[in-house]
Image: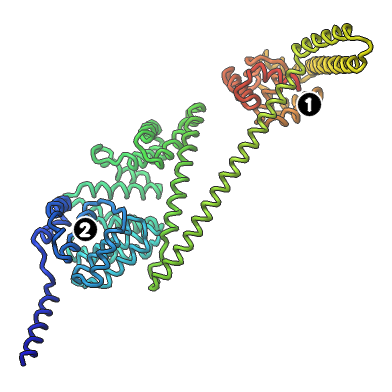
């Protein structure tokens, strides 16, 4: 009988324990109660009782550690490791207060969310949903919202919409205005990403109307800004401006980079180029790399409209620089996304994660090998081209020197020295005499070759001067007229007839544009920069810049304009 009574008492105690769970000290329960509304104060309270936890029972120690993670999460402090949450999850799965297991799962999901591990985050959020009762409406609403965010980041838009709709229904039941607005906003954004822009605008309008009725003005501004972005994508710039104007007129509430970027696009597409120039310049200072890329592109367009080609060139260089940065960021984001791809519908999540992990390792290895190979090819190409450039530069200098008066003069001096040496050499030393004679003959031949080339160049110059096209060009100079396309063709034929393979020889050293080739032909005609500017219909300054570019192409930074002219005349 006594044993039966003892068993009944034990069962009753176990029943009450299971219903009400273990008791915790007041400091822990108070911190828990305010963690969602005032996480900073909750963290301060937890820190104040930290010294007490060393001697506390295990259930209180684990509860304390869970609350620390919860308060940090509510304070938007990013989790950087899963080392703190995993022992907590294991504890509540095996022996801890089962009423806290759902919270342990939820914050494990939040930790992996911050670690960009979508599969693990979804795993724990689904576990939380599985054990959370339907009457816990706030918790389920937050869960659906978080799962929706993860699916959105994985570009699983239809599944994300389904989760947001579930969260929206629960928030509406609670009359939770702020979370309803955020959910409507995210729904609108997801519909837009899914290319359902009309549905997107419907939800943005709902979010905006609700935000106007609340004290959360910053939320209204966020919704207006995102709505403006959708209107810009739809090319409805009037509506976009209506949404953006209230934001731009309140500079204290502006997120400069995205809002200025949208203002820039509106101004560019509505012909407000002065305002567009202002926003583009501002973005180069305050914008993200994406915004700076957009600003540089539009500044290039504006400069081209103004025919300010120097500014256009500078802005185009900036645009290319920012484009390279965006490509690097995009590639990194793509790799991260591939590393976290997850099919949340499959119930055998462990097998899927293992497959995904192996696939990601192969992908990373492939990317590393590919990038290394590309870098290697680029390096080899650079070395090869640099060597070719140096060799070409050496040939150019050698060719110019061997046709110069200085070369002929030095050779003559060497010939005289050899002749003097011959006089001093004994007739018996036949080998030395033969060697000196050979050197003397080589130098004489080199001089004859150089003088023949000089004579040939002078002769070709005289023959060109006697042609009809040359006379036409001289007449154009006097009458301030430009050369016509047909006359360019005639000049091209004439120059290449009188100077054998002029164009082929020139292009064998470096590829150049048609405009640059025209300048080279005019240099061959011994025309001045002013005369060239007249014939080409441009300024003398433009001719000087073009000649400087040609000089840099052929001689790098080591040559002069005179070197280039001598080179052209030597061909």
Residue 277 in view here? yes
* Residue situated in front as seen by the camera: 389 or 60: 60
Q: Which mark is residue 242?
A: none
x and y percentages locating residue 535 in the rendered image: 66, 20
Total tally of numbered discs in the picture: 2
- Identify the element where label 2 is drawn: helix
- Give the residue at x 62% y 41%: 380
484 over 78 or under it: above or below: above
Structure colour scheme: rainbow
The quarter of the picture where residue 491 lies is top right
Q: Name the residue under label 1.
A: 496
Task: Characterize the local packing of mark 1: few (<14), some (14-19) or many (20 or more) Cα atoms within 10 angstroms.
Answer: some
Distance between the Cα atoms at labels 2 and 1? 82 Å
Rendered location of residue 473, percent (x, y) = 72, 18
In this view, 499 is above or below 388: above
Vertical order, 89 against 395 (above or below): below
Which quadrant, please, contains the N terminus?
bottom left
Position of residue 555 measured from the top left corner of the image (x, y, whole percent): 64, 24
Relative to 268, residue 472 above or below: above
Q: Name the residue under label 2.
A: 70
């Amino acid at each position: 009988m006594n044993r039966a009574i003892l068993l009944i008492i034990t069962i009753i105690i176990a029943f009450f324990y299971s219903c009400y769970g273990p008791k915790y000290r007041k400091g822990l329960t108070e911190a828990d109660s305010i963690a969602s509304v005032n996480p900073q104060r909750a963290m301060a309270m937890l820190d104040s009782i930290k010294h007490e936890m060393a001697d506390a029972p295990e259930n209180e120690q684990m509860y304390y550690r869970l609350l620390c993670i919860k308060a940090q999460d509510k304070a938007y402090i990013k989790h950087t490791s899963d080392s703190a949450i995993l022992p907590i999850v294991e504890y509540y799965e095996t022996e801890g207060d089962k009423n806290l297991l759902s919270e342990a799962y939820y914050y494990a999901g939040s930790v992996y969310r911050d670690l960009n591990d979508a599969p693990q985050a979804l795993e724990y959020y689904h576990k939380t949903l599985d054990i959370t009762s339907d009457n816990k409406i706030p918790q389920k609403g937050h869960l659906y919202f978080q799962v929706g965010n993860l699916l959105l980041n994985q570009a699983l838009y239809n599944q994300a919409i389904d989760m947001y709709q579930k969260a929206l229904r629960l928030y509406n039941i609670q009359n939770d205005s702020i979370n309803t607005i955020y959910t409507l906003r995210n729904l609108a954004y997801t519909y837009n990403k899914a290319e359902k822009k009309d549905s997107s605008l419907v939800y943005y309008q709902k979010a905006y109307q609700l935000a106007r009725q609340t004290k959360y003005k910053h939320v209204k501004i966020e919704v207006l800004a995102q709505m403006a972005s959708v209107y810009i994508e739809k090319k409805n710039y009037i509506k976009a401006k209506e949404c953006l104007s209230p934001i731009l007129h309140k500079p204290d509430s502006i997120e400069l980079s995205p809002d200025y970027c949208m203002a820039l696009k509106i101004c560019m597409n509505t012909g407000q180029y002065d305002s567009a120039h202002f926003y583009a310049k501002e973005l180069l200072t305050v914008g993200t790399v994406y915004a700076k890329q957009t600003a540089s592109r539009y500044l290039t367009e504006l400069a081209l409209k103004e025919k300010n080609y120097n500014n256009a060139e500078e802005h185009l260089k900036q645009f290319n620089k920012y484009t390279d940065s965006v490509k690097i960021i995009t590639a990194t984001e793509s790799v991260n996304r591939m590393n976290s791809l997850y099919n949340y519908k499959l119930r055998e999540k462990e097998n899927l994660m293992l497959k995904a992990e192996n696939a990601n390792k192969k992908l990373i290895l492939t990317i590393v090998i590919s990038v290394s190979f590309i870098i290697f090819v680029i390096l080899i190409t650079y070395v090869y081209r640099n060597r070719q450039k140096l060799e070409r530069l050496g040939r150019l200098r050698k060719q110019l020197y061997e046709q110069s008066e200085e070369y002929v003069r030095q050779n003559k001096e060497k010939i005289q020295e050899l002749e003097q040496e011959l006089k001093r050499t004994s007739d018996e030393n036949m080998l030395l005499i033969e060697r000196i004679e050979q050197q003397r003959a080589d130098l004489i031949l080199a001089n004859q070759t150089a003088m023949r080339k000089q004579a040939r160049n002078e002769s070709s110059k005289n023959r060109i001067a006697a042609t009809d096209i040359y006379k036409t060009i001289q007449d154009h100079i006097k009458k301030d007229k430009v050369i016509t396309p047909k006359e360019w063709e005639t000049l091209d034929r004439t120059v290449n007839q009188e100077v054998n393979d002029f164009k082929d020889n020139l292009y064998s050293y470096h590829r150049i544009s048609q405009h640059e080739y025209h300048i080279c032909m005019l240099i061959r005609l011994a025309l001045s920069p002013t005369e060239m500017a007249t014939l080409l219909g441009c300024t003398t300054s433009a001719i000087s810049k073009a000649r400087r570019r040609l000089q840099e192409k052929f001689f790098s930074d080591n040559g002069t304009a005179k070197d280039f002219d001598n080179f052209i005349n030597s061909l």
